[in-house]
């Protein structure tokens, strides 16, 4: 079920703007809370207040509440009450001191909730608790942080410096490309021919290296074969000598036996 349209008139209607202040002196402002000292710097180092006007154009009293998504960051006075028929009220929204970061987007929002007050109302909290969803009306506002004018100019100058430095970096990379584009066709052709010649020379050297490796391998195989053949011949020669020696020994032994028998 859609909620009823807001009967209160809000001024401003959509945004709560908080303009920072430029510090007056080298030291940051001090905020004393619970006997502790907190130091804040930047344009929001002090309390910044903005006003929200709520008007009741109806002929009935209206109850209201002001809520925020960041209750610790804001102090709202009054944050609830009753607006009589045909009257208005000013709500002070006080932004508490904090360290401002210009690169951080504010996502804080406020909501003004209202409902028509019963004629015999005695307990406002009880009325809020017993209210039905179709009796509640609300309006939402977002928070906007505004820099002081002099600091805003400084921030813009810093942004412009960053942009100009990035442009200078990109421009410094352009001469290399422009130099390559200024070469004429004759120079390009010479460079291409030189590259082709170097590639052919490299290919020839690779082939020669491959042929040398193959020749070395063939020589190694031949030398291994010749050494194995010489070794086999030496073994056969040694075997022949050993057989002759054995035959000579046998012959001498036989001759010794024959001589011995003759002598006897």
Image (cartoon, rainbow, N blue to C red):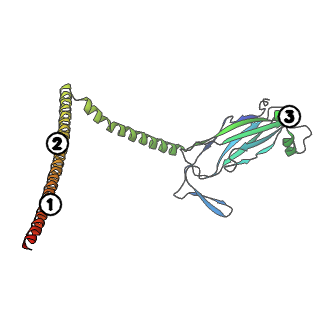
Left or right: 13 as drawn, with respect to 181: right
| Point 14% across, 52% down: residue | 233
- Residue 208: numbered disc: none
Quarter of the figure that contains the C terminus: bottom left
- Residue found at the far top of this picture: 185
Q: Bin the neighbour count of mark 1 within 10 Å (Cα to Cα): few under 14, some 14-19, many 20 and up.
A: few
* Pointer 3 with pointer 2, Cβ within 8 A: no
Q: Position of residue 223 (x, y in %)?
A: 16, 48
What is the distance, in whole Å, between disc 3 and disc 2 at their CAs? 113 Å
| Point 82% across, 36% down: residue | 115
Number of marks in the rendered image = 3
Q: Bin the neighbour count of mark 3 within 10 Å (Cα to Cα): few under 14, some 14-19, many 20 and up.
A: some
| Point 16% across, 46% down: residue | 222
Which residue bears the numbered disc 2? 215
Quarter of the figure with residue 162: top left
- Residue found at the far bottom of this picture: 264
| Point 28% across, 32% down: residue | 178
Q: Position of residue 175 (x, y in %)?
A: 28, 35
Which residue bears the numbered disc 3? 60
In primary-sequence order, the first of circles 1 and 3 is: 3
In primary-sequence order, the first of circles 1 and 2 is: 2
What is the distance, in whole Å, between disc 1 and disc 3 at their CAs? 142 Å
Depth check: give the residue in front, 66 or 106.
106
Q: Is residue 8 above or below residue 264?
A: above
- Residue 242: numbered disc: 1
Q: Nearer the viewer, mark 3 or mark 2?
A: 2
**Badge 2 element:** helix
């Amino acid at each position: 079920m859609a909620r009823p349209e807001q009967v209160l008139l809000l001024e401003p209607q959509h945004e709560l703007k908080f303009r920072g202040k430029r510090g007056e002196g080298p030291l940051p402002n001090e905020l004393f809370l619970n006997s502790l000292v907190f130091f804040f710097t930047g344009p929001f180092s002090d309390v910044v207040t903005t006003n929200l006007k709520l008007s009741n154009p109806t002929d009935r009293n209206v109850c209201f509440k002001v809520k925020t998504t960041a209750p610790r960051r804001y102090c709202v006075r009054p944050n609830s009450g009753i607006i009589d028929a045909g009257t208005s009220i000013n709500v002070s929204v006080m932004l508490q001191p904090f360290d401002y970061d210009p690169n951080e987007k504010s996502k804080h929002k406020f909501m003004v909730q209202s409902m028509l007050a019963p004629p015999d109302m005695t307990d406002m909290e009880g009325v809020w608790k017993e209210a039905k969803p179709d009796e509640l009306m609300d309006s939402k506002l977002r928070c906007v942080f505004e820099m002081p004018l002099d600091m805003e100019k400084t921030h813009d100058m810093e942004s412009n410096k960053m942009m100009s430095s990035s442009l200078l970096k990109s421009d410094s990379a352009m001469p290399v490309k422009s130099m390559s584009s200024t070469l004429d066709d004759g120079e390009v052709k010479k460079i291409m021919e030189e590259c082709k010649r170097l590639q052919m020379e490299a290919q020839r050297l690779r082939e020669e290296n491959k042929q040398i490796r193959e020749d070395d391998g063939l020589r190694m195989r031949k030398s291994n074969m010749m050494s194995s053949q010489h070794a086999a011949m030496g073994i056969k020669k040694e075997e022949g000598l050993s057989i002759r020696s054995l035959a000579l020994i046998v012959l001498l032994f036989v001759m010794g036996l024959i001589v011995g028998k003759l002598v006897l």
